Amino acid sequence: PRRSAAEMDALVASGRVEGRPVPGALSPHEEYPDEIAEAIRAA
């Protein structure tokens, strides 16, 4: 979606979440489920 990046930036700016760049064309959890799960567990 067009506003998706702005919404993610706002979440990161709130200080309640940490952003992690993940390359890919699909949603990160679809292309890299193991890496996403690891990042969530490490938080």
Image: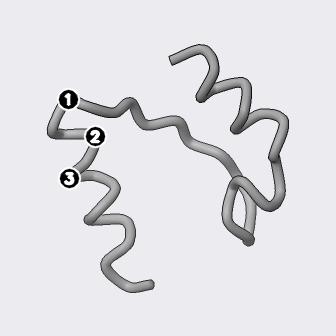
Q: Residue furthest left?
A: 14
Please tell me whether mark 3 sits on a helix, a strand or a loop.
helix
Q: Is residue 18 left or right of residue 32?
A: left
User: In this figure, which residue is indicated by the disc labeled 3?
Assistant: 10
Q: Earlier in the sequence, mark 1 or mark 3?
A: 3
Measure how far apart labels 1 and 3 are at the Cα level.
9 Å
Measure how far apart labels 2 and 1 are at the Cα level.
6 Å
Q: Vertical placement of 20 versus 4: above or below? A: above
User: In this figure, which residue is indicated by the disc labeled 1?
Assistant: 15
Q: Nearer the viewer, residue 37 or 5?
A: 37
Give the quarter of the figure containing the N terminus: bottom left
Q: Vertical placement of 5 versus 38: above or below? A: below
**Label 3 crowd (10 A; few <14 / some 14-19 / many >=20):** few
Question: Which residue: 24% across, 31% down?
Answer: 16
Please tell me whether mark 2 sits on a helix, a strand or a loop.
helix
Q: Is residue 39 left or right of residue 26?
A: left
Please tell me whether mark 1 sits on a helix, a strand or a loop.
loop
Question: Which residue: 82% across, 47% down?
Answer: 32
User: In this figure, which residue is indicated by the disc labeled 2?
Assistant: 12
Is mark 2 in CB contact (under 8 Å) with mark 3?
yes
Is mark 1 in CB contact (under 8 Å) with mark 3?
no
Residue 3's spot in the image, x, y percent?
31, 78
**Label 1 crowd (10 A; few <14 / some 14-19 / many >=20):** few
Residue type, label 2: Val
Residue type, label 3: Ala
Residue type, label 1: Gly
Q: Residue furthest front?
A: 41
